[in-house]
Image (spheres, helix red, strand yellow):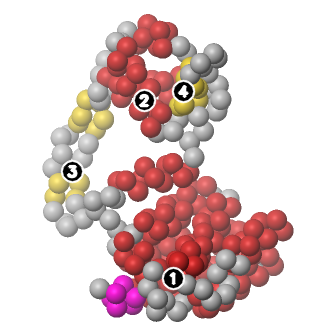
Amino acid sequence: MPVVIEKKKETGRDGQRLFVPAERTKRRPEAIADRIKDYIRSEGLGPGDRLPQERDLIDTFKAAKGTVREAMKALETQGLVFTRSGPGGGAFVAKPSARHAMELLSTHFFFDQPSISDIYAMRKVLEPEVAALLAGRVTREELIALENTIRIYDHPPADLDEQYRQRVAELDFHSMLAQLCPNPLLGFVCGLMHNLLRELPAARAIYADPTSLSRETGLSFQYRLMAALKDGRSEDARVIAAEHMAFAESYMLERAAATK
């Protein structure tokens, strides 16, 4: 029986109404991929567990070999399945990584990229909450890892290549905080914002700009934030992160205008 997804009218970024079909019938491989996901859940399978052989899947779904292979390929692309050849080979359940998921989502914005303002509108709201949640929960080892990241950019760069690496490392500091966030969805969305910013041509041009001078101010915010996290000062952490995001947005927009 075909699987049907209801679709509603949507509005594009330019405000124009986009008309899409009220419903779309899933292709057979997509429907089989969904049923394999259901099987993984119902059987309680986890990363590394073997999936049924191809012949068994063909018999179960009464589908052609090519259809089953296309379904498995889709799951592999999603990061939920991996295959291994040779003795003991076959298809196995994989653990989808956050990086892989972010790469897939970034592709969604390939032709319609968000602006610096779009990204910072999200960062200003979400990153202070990450900081507040982490206050008092960061271990000594995690603080050391954060400080080791800061050491990459706690000194003037020797050349433009090092400056670029330093600017990316500044984002890595915030990505580490996102990874440590006790709310995994909040942390993932923040990480996605960092990933989009790393790939945004306008941001990359700013990172390569020899007149970039925000390193010292950024360091000050980050050291203050680390102290608040270590001391368990939740509200201070939220305020510091909010101030940092506001400063970063202002700086990025100013430099974006100057580098046009």
Residue at position x 48%, y 63% from top?
195
Q: Amino acid at mark 3?
A: Lys
Residue numbers of the magenta segment:
254-259
Residue at position x 15%, y 50% from top?
19
Where does label 1 land, which residue? Answer: 160
Where does label 4 land, which residue? Answer: 83
Q: Amino acid at mark 1?
A: Leu
Where does label 3 land, which residue? Answer: 9
Closer to the eye: label 4 or 1: 1
Closer to the eye: label 1 or 2: 1
Is 233 above or below relative to 198?
Answer: below
Is 174 displayed left or right of 135 in the figure? left
Q: Callout 1: few (<14), some (14-19), or many (20+) C-alpha neighbours within 10 Å? A: few
Residue 258 highlighted magenta (yes or no):
yes
Residue at position x 56%, y 22% from top?
85
Give residue 145's position: percent from left, percent from top: 75, 68
Give residue 185's position: percent from left, percent from top: 56, 55
Marks 4 and 1 close (CB-CB < 8 Å): no
Q: Amino acid at mark 4?
A: Thr
Is 164 above or below relative to 88?
Answer: below
Residue 208 highlighted magenta (yes or no):
no
Cα separation, mark 1 vs mark 3, equals 47 Å
Q: Callout 4: few (<14), some (14-19), or many (20+) C-alpha neighbours within 10 Å? A: some
> Residue 202: which quarter of the image?
bottom left
Q: Callout 2: few (<14), some (14-19), or many (20+) C-alpha neighbours within 10 Å? A: some
Whichever of callouts 2 and 3 sits on the residue coming sooner in the sequence is 3
Is 17 displayed left or right of 58 in the figure? left
